[in-house]
């Protein structure tokens, strides 16, 4: 990678970090591009070298959150010595913890507004293709250890994600999300053939 590429990548990361901070302080709706560049300590033109609009930086911030979420999920889904059942529960509680993060609450509320469906869809397009293999691998492990009984692990992974997505589609209030995800996780374990759930 050339120094120019590294510098460009670092500058983009700086802008994403600044946007995350500003969104946490002012809320997504209240934040402006001027606020973001001020927090990053760069000129407004620099912002537009990396992003076309505020919507683009919102997607980048959400993608950064998704990267952190996926890294945590990857660790949880492959944790040695932990049963597939427990790892499935950890995934649900990881989503629940994320939903309760005050710095992300405004971002989550903003991206789930009906008028922001396009932003939400862009985020989902980035997240789902990366999430399915993690969940499928976890289900395969559960089948191998005898905790889960499903004939098609990929279909089961899609079905489980659909159920978790249902919590979002039902417009579940943020305060109720942890309990809803815990119940969705319990139901997912039953669907996977785990009788203890």
Image (cartoon, rainbow, N blue to C red):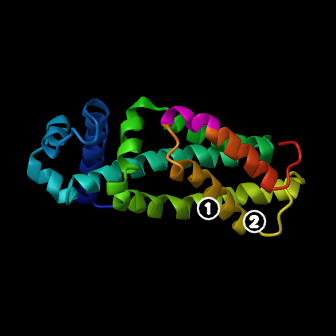
Residue 3 picture location, percent across and down: 25, 56
- Mark 1 crowd level (few <14, some 14–19, many ≥20, 10 Å Cα): some
Q: Residue at x 78, y 60 (%)?
A: 140
Query: Between disc 2 and disc 1, whose residue precedes?
Result: 1
In the drawing, what numbered circle is on residue 188?
none
In front of the other: 124 or 112: 112
Q: Residue at x 9, y 46 (%)?
A: 43
The kind of secondary structure element at disc 1 is helix
Residue 88 picture location, percent across and down: 72, 46
Question: Disc 2 to disc 1, how far (Cα)?
Answer: 10 Å
Is 177 magenta? The answer is yes
Q: Residue at x 85, y 55 (%)?
A: 193
Going by the image, does 159 lie left or right of 13? right
Total number of numbered labels?
2
Task: From this view, report whether residue 57 is shown above or below residue 72.
Answer: below
In the drawing, what numbered circle is on residue 153?
2
Q: Main secondary structure of the magenta part?
A: helix
Task: From this view, report whether residue 42 is shown above or below residue 57.
Answer: above
Range of the magenta residues?
Answer: 174-179
In the drawing, what numbered circle is on residue 132?
1
In front of the other: 69 or 191: 191
Going by the image, does 85 lie left or right of 180? right
The answer to whether residue 79 is seen in the rendering is: no
Determine which quarter of the picture holds residue 135: bottom right
Q: Quadrant of the N terminus?
A: bottom left
Is 34 magenta? The answer is no
């Amino acid at each position: 990678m050339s120094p120019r590429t590294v510098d460009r990548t670092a500058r983009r990361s700086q802008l994403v970090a600044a946007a995350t901070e500003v969104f946490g302080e002012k809320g997504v709706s209240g934040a402006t591009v001027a606020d973001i560049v001020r927090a990053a300590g760069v000129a407004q033109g620099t912002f537009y070298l990396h992003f076309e609009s505020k919507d683009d930086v919102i997607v980048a911030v959400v993608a950064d959150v998704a990267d952190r979420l996926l890294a945590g999920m990857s660790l949880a889904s492959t944790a040695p010595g932990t049963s597939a059942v427990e790892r499935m529960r950890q995934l649900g509680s990881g989503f629940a913890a994320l939903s309760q993060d005050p710095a992300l609450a405004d971002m989550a509320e903003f991206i789930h507004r009906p008028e922001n469906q396009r932003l939400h869809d862009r985020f989902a397009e980035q997240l789902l293709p990366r999430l399915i293999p993690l969940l499928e691998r976890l289900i395969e492990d559960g089948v191998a250890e005898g905790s889960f009984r499903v004939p098609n692990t990929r279909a089961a992974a899609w079905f489980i994600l659909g159920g978790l997505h249902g919590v979002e589609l039902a417009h579940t209030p943020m305060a109720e999300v942890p309990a809803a995800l815990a119940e969705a996780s319990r139901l997912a374990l039953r669907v996977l053939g785990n009788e203890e759930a």
